[in-house]
Image (cartoon, grey):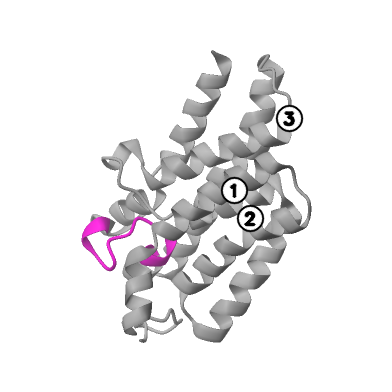
Amino acid sequence: MLIAVSFIVSYLIGSIPTSFLVAKYLKGIDIREHGSGNVGATNTARVVGKLPGLLVLVFDILKGWVCVALVAKLFIRLGVTVIEPNTYALMLGSMAIIGHIWTVFLGFKGGKGIATSSGVFLGAAPKIFLIALAIWIAVFAWKRYVSLASIISAVSIPIMLAVMSYPPSFVIITSIVCAITVYRHHPNIKKLVRGEEHRFTLGKKDER
């Protein structure tokens, strides 16, 4: 019973629609009706502003980290019996990612899960997170495409877990989660192929 409750709690934490709330509070708009329509940090930065976008990014990362680093430990102390605590924590983090992507608060239509995934791996596999972050920064610095950097870094994570001999459960769960986040980028992939994806800049408008 406690395990089910922990899954629900993690899902609800992940479901908090940070981008939607920030845009609604600061500009009185529905972020889903502006920009790319995505409920995430990048679209918030483009539509509302860079600082609000940064706020959304940090909070969305925290959603994943909290479930892995705090919620998992809390429920283990409350009596949840698990064979592998780290895998259990990763599963709760995965529920947070699912919550972010399919949030109950917005009709099960949320973001793409990259920031929340970052928080999950920051808590569950810090070394992997740092390498994936370095990959993201390198790709973004090279091409200035947030989507491309996110896709490549997401694909790299399960590969790194396998190469570094993490438990099979880690690799399997991560592969599923990363496949979902990459799939959520399918509109961006189409735009990248057509050369229509916008580059993210610090100026007033993004470039193609």
Report x, y in % for residue 90. Answer: 63, 39
Q: Are marks 1 and 3 in contact (CB under 8 Å)?
A: no
Residue contact between numbered discs 1 and 2, judged by CB atoms under 8 Å: yes
Residue 56 seen in this snapshot: no
Quadrant the C terminus occupies: bottom left
Q: Residue drawn at (65%, 30%), measured in percent from left and top?
A: 72
Image spot of residue 156 (x, y percent)? 62, 64
- Give the magenta-colored segment's residue range: 32-44
Q: Is residue 61 magenta?
A: no
Residue that mark 3 sits on: 84
Tag 3: residue type? Glu
Q: Quadrant of residue 50?
A: bottom left
Is residue 21 visible from the viewing direction of this image?
Answer: yes
CA gap, disc 1 and disc 2: 6 Å
Residue farthest toward the right in the current orientation of the protein? 165
Residue 55 vs 4, above or below: the answer is: below
The amino acid marked with disc number 1 is Thr
Q: What amino acid type should be assigned to the residue bearing mark 2?
A: Pro
Up the image or down, 64 lies above or below 26; here it is above
Give the CA separation, mark 3 to mark 2: 19 Å
Which quadrant would residue 2 be assigned to in this image?
Answer: top right
Q: Earlier in the sequence, mark 3 or mark 2?
A: 3
Q: Residue 176 appears at what percent x and percent y?
A: 52, 47
Residue pointed to by mark 1: 174
| Residue 66 higher or lower than 190, as above or below | above
Splitting the image into 4 quarters, where does residue 78 fall?
top right
C-alpha gap between disc 1 and disc 3:
15 Å
Q: Earlier in the sequence, mark 1 or mark 2?
A: 2
Residue 105 in percent (x, y) is at 31, 38
Residue positioned 57% across, 50% down in the render: 175
Helix, strand or loop at label 3? It is: loop
**Quarter in which the N terminus is drawn:** top right
